[in-house]
Amino acid sequence: MTSRNASLLDPGFDLTLRPMRYPRFYEMYRAAIKNTWTVEEIDFQIDLGHLSQRMTPADRHLIERLVAFFATGDSIVSNNLVISLYRHINSPEARMYLSRQLFEEALHIQFYLTLLDNYVPDQQRRAQAFAAIENIPSIRRKAQFCQKWTDEVFGLQQIASEADRRRFLLNLTCFASCIEGLFFFGAFAYVYFLRSRGLLPGLAAGTNWVFRDESAHMAFAFEVINTVRREEPHLFDASWAEQVQTMIEEAVECEAAFAEDVLSGGVVGLTRREMRQYLEYVADQRLRALQLPARYNVRNPFAFMELQDVQELTNFFERRVSAYQVGVQGEVAFDEAF
């Protein structure tokens, strides 16, 4: 058992759900359960016609790079959930949410597997896409970035010192701000660009649900960071801020290099300069969420992203998500009494 005055990052596995120490995590778990979808509901038939009849070679290159990244990216996220976050966030309410998130990451992996099987019929090219970390330099660079900022925590059996706490916070910050918060949001922009041209409605439909899931995952991670900030504010010092700023700048450069690759064929209507500006815009939103000053101070260049405006994500759980909810029966009170 853990003392009621313990920190969220204290070693061990607190099993006590009453009295509930972190009801916000439980609320997030409940919200996630309400928003359930399946890959089998997505219809790719129109997409296949678009791929064969309405897309240029440059468009098809964009799509193949995109699904290759998706196929590897969520596996990286899932590994980090199990090896790092579940092990070290000492709250049963938070572990309930992380269990649900792991299911959602598996669902995303299934979605991207289905995309590749439908979009890339050639078996050799499909195998290369699944091995993107080895075969595609722009994706390998992103994987190496993830390893640099997250793998150091993987060997920790428990967070036993302040140095361990700082390493864990950098892992979590990278996970929330850069991997899910920048790499995936950059990828989503390509999908919504294609949607704005009336292309690939199946991809867009599935991405809408993935976008919603990833928004919730990011909101949860920032809630963990903010909880630790309240409990142990000394960890968020100038050194932490400098490291985070460096990390996010590196992430922007990695994703900009990916954009150079994705758009190398000359995709009509989408420029590398616009994509970089969008990445910088998203990076500033992440810095502000971490209570750090913006680095780039640019506007969102994409009108087609307004419905998915990243500025709205901090209010994700304050809005009622009416689209595609399943019913959940039973209520749990959040008072401290048994």
Image: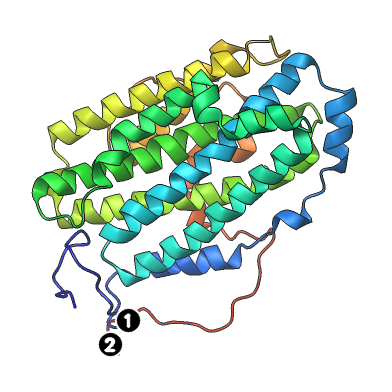
Residue 97 placement (x, y as % from top left)? 43, 64
Q: Answer whether residue 299 is visible to the viewer in this image.
A: no
Give neighbour class at mark 1: few <14, some 14-19, many 20+ (Cα, 10 Å): few
In this figure, what is the number of numbered marks? 2
User: Which residue is at the front of the view, 44 or 271?
Assistant: 44
Q: How is the image coloured?
A: rainbow
- Position of 314 with respect to 40 (left or right) is left
Residue 241 placement (x, y as % from top left)? 21, 32
Residue 223 placement (x, y as % from top left)? 34, 54
Alpha carbons under labels 2 and 1: distance apart: 6 Å
Q: Quadrant of residue 49?
A: top right
Which residue is the extreme one toward the front?
124
- Please give the name of the residue rendered at 36% of the width and 78% of the height, measured from the top-left corner: 334
- Please give the name of the residue rendered at 34% of the width and 38% of the height, measured from the top-left corner: 174
Q: Which mark is residue 337?
A: 2
Marks 2 and 1: CB-CB under 8 Å? yes
Considering the image in quadrants, where does the N terminus appear?
A: bottom left
- Please give the name of the residue rendered at 69% of the width and 27% of the height, measured from the top-left corner: 125
Q: Amino acid at mark 1?
A: Asp
Give neighbour class at mark 2: few <14, some 14-19, many 20+ (Cα, 10 Å): few
Residue 5 placement (x, y as % from top left)? 13, 71
Numbered disc 1: secondary structure: loop
- Position of 26 with respect to 293 (left or right) is right
Per the image, the residue denoted by label 1 is 335
- Position of 162 with respect to 153 (left or right) is left
User: Which residue is at the front of the view, 181 or 297?
Assistant: 181
